[in-house]
Image: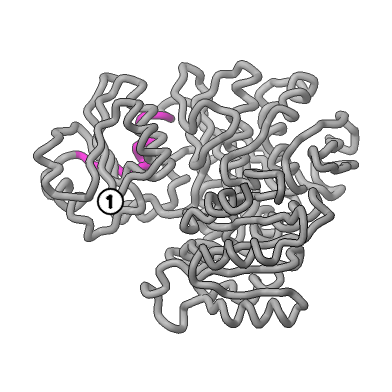
Amino acid sequence: MQPKKIHFVGVGGVAMGTFAVALSEYGHEVTGSDNALYEPMKGVLASAKVTLFEGFKAENLQRVHPDLVVIGNVVRKDNPEAQAWIRSGTKFLSLAEAVRVFLIQDKRSLVCAGTHGKTTTSSWTSFLLQELEMNPSYLIGGVPLDLDRGCKLTDSDLFVCEGDEYDSAFFDKGAKFLHYYPHFLLLLNIEFDHADIYKDLKHVQASFEKLVALLPGDGLCVARYEDAVVMETIAGAICPIQTFGSSPGAMWRLGQRTESENGYEFELIYKNRSVGNFKSPMFGEHNLLNLTAGIVAAVNLGASIEKIRPIVEKFRGARRRQEVLMKDPIVLVDDFAHHPTEVKATLKAVRQRYPQGKLWALFEPRSATARRSVHQDEYAAAFDSADEILVSTPYRQGELKEGEKLSTDVLVDSLVTRGKKAASLTKSQEIVEKVVAGRTGRDIVVVMSNGEFDKIQEKLIKAFS
């Protein structure tokens, strides 16, 4: 493809920024704007020679003259710069459509999809195939710990991507993953999420059914056996299906596993025959299942189990996915969890890894679903593994109607009824001070938010350093 001039509106997001860097390094002339640009993405973009403009302004049209504009899904319909570009007649695409045009093209696309685990699984599968010298292109909606960057373009015919069910842009309301035309699909789980765009679970499932329908006859669907919605969704697939899970009915399943503070040793069983043991530093059974999905994909691409085995132990995961930031004098774990299923799985995994010590859960209801009341009851049970829970004021509550809002007071009351110590606090510094005052020893502190949480992680590190 001939080099182009490409401008990104909303370049500061992880996926947008990572994609912009990759295109710049591939020879395109890239510029970008965002309302506010923060480190580390600001520095990453600048070092990749991406020209940056702070603020969404119609005047940016006078500064750059691109062949194409990519508009991110955080950009709203009333955004002055987006509207100016559209009126100008310049060709514009959503990020998902641009990924198809620039990254997928004629490649075989391997899409990692599901309500939970997409970033970890796409990071793992990309790393695994790279270590196996299959040299895949990839795009990950997070920051992998074991890859140089979250996006890479290669000459391989394989492309690995995180398949997000969220809509693509205000002018492109279909799910992002529908642009990725999967040849291989790793379908991890399906639950109700993104309450700002989906009405209920059936509405979410309908998007996944469209994704499954895109699989060609010579493709492959790797599906979570224990998830009833997943199994119902893949019924229409015309390609082969291989299931994975932890119960006897799965084609690929977890066998015996033991855990220490250093990680897991686990057995993998294929068609009731053990293929041996693997070691992993990852947290939780849910991550062992994510690893299994990637292993299944690699085997079906021709890799041997013996070549895969040592690679499993090397994979550390992605930033903010049960990432240990500090081990002494407290254990500080940073996680992206925001859906109640994720909160429950993260806390259970951390409790299993660190069975001794007081476990604190610090939770910021920030995502479009978390700050709504749709999972009010489910959140109470999600914190059962924690000893003390501190909940912050939900993000941008003023945007929601009174009946739609998550009530942190009701949540705290429910937690207390379940025998937990819990409080709702307005400021992050108050949360930090409460943890410092209530510390009992080598406590375990888990920070959970899909956003910045007022940089509470840095405040905790400073308080305990």
Viewer-proximal residue among 364 and 117: 364
Q: Which of 313 and 131 is in front in this view?
A: 313
Taking the image as drawn, is residue 234 in sight?
no
Vertical side of 46 occupied by 228: above or below:
below
Coloration of the structure image? one colour
Residue 14: where, in percent of width, then height? 43, 42
Residue 88 appears in the rendering = yes
Read off the magenta span.
Answer: 91-103
For this orientation, the residue located farthest to the left is 62
Q: Which residue is drawn at 37% across and 75% down?
A: 398
Q: Height in image: 138 above or below 177?
A: above
Rendered residue at 62%/44% (across/down): 325
What residue is at 62 percent from the left and 77 percent from the top? 411
Left or right side of 100 for 92: left
Q: Main secondary structure of the magenta part?
A: helix
Residue 357 quadrant: bottom right
360 w.r.t. 44: above or below: below
340 vs 355, left or right, is left
Picture coordinates of residue 39 (x, y %)?
40, 41
Q: What element carries label 1?
A: loop
State the image coordinates of residue 294 (x, y, percent, origin top left).
67, 34
Q: How crowded is mark 1: few (under 14 residues within 10 Å), some or many (20 or more)?
A: some
Q: Mark 1 points at which residue?
A: 35
Find residue 190 and report its horizontal and vertical position in percent: 61, 56
Position of the N terminus, as image quadrant, is: top left
For the point 40% across and 38% down, the residue is 41
What amino acid is at disc 1? Answer: Asn
Query: In terms of depth relative to the viewer, which is nearer, 457 or 367?
Result: 457
Q: For this rendering, which residue is in front, 94 or 16?
A: 16
